[in-house]
Amino acid sequence: MNNNILALLISFIAGLSTTLGSIFIWIKPKSINNFIGTSLSFSGTIMILISLTELLPEGFFYIKYKYNIIYAILSLIIIFLIARLLNILINKKIKNKASKNVNLYRIGVLSMIALMIHNLPEGILTYVSSKVDLKLGIKLALAIMLHNVPEGIAIAVPIYYSTNSKKRGVEGAFISGLSEPLGAILAALLLSKYLTNTLVSIILLFVASIMINISINDIFEEANKYPRRSIILGIILGVITTLTLNFFF
């Protein structure tokens, strides 16, 4: 098989693993409130930890290395403020389309948008790695797949419980996952011309900033409406999951 096609296929499979997170909408919990609270805090914790342990350091330290510490700090502050402003604007634009819970629907849509942006550089990274070393690409794709499952939960569960539509929940997770092979396609078409390490670093800082904003200002704000024990359980599970993934990958 052509190396380009194989690299794109690996990126496609890794991205669509986000859809696996939507299987949680078929779970029939004893307490819906506990389940939603745990799911929200679980996915919010993972999004924050991925941002703090992977995305922010990688983007920040490259800019620091390429330019200087002042430039890196200013870049981080400006990008974080832009991400916050975007978060506010998106919140205002989302209309009342949910039949039950507007806030849950809003969180599902916000998570989908944030993770679509997040998945673009992942798709680029998977494609490039697979082109250079197929085994490395497969290993990276596996790590991304495992990260993508809880990200799918962050999208599918809020959308389903706010609209009572499994179809919408699955569609949201699926659409978010499509941005990963899109990143791979962009890498294949534009890598040699436009994609630089500095641009990738800026994208990483932006993705981390918007994920942290959404997690703190939307996901955890909504999670606080549910039983406290479910929030604590979700945070613990999120920390364990992230540490486990980071340890093995």
Image (cartoon, rainbow, N blue to C red):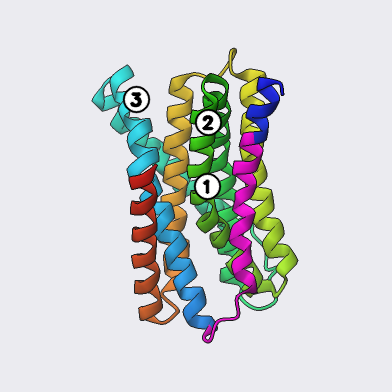
Q: Looking at the image, which residue is at 57% across and 69% down?
A: 104
Badge 3 density bin: few <14, some 14–19, many ≥20, Cα 10 Å:
some
Of helix, strand and loop, which one carries label 1? helix
Vertical arrangement, residue 206 with respect to residue 168, above or below: above
Q: In which quarter of the image is residue 61?
A: top left
Q: Mark 2 highlights which residue?
A: 137
Q: Magenta residues?
A: 10-31
Vertical arrangement, residue 131 with respect to residue 46, above or below: above
Vertical arrangement, residue 131 with respect to residue 55, above or below: above
The outermost residue toward the left is 69
- Disc 2 marks which amino acid? Gly
Mark 1 / mark 2, whichever is N-terminal: 1
Looking at the image, which is closer to me, 72 or 183?
183
Q: Are marks 1 and 3 in contact (CB under 8 Å)?
A: no
Q: Mark 3 highlights which residue?
A: 62
Of helix, strand and loop, which one carries label 3? helix
Is most of the magenta stretch helix, strand or loop? helix
Residue 16 magenta-highlighted: yes
* Image quarter (top left, top right, bottom left or bottom right) of the C terminus: top left
Given this view, does label 1 or label 3 mark the residue nearer the observer? 3
Tell me the CA gap for discs 1 and 3. Answer: 24 Å
Badge 1 density bin: few <14, some 14–19, many ≥20, Cα 10 Å:
some
Say the numbered circle drawn on residue 86: 1
Given this view, does label 3 or label 2 mark the residue nearer the observer? 2
**Residue 144: x percent and y percent?**
51, 43
Tell me the CA gap for discs 1 and 2. Answer: 33 Å
Q: Looking at the image, which residue is at 50% across and 82% down?
A: 33
**Residue 219: x percent and y percent?**
47, 64
- Disc 1 marks which amino acid? Leu
**Residue 231: x percent and y percent?**
39, 73
Q: In which quarter of the image is residue 178?
A: top right
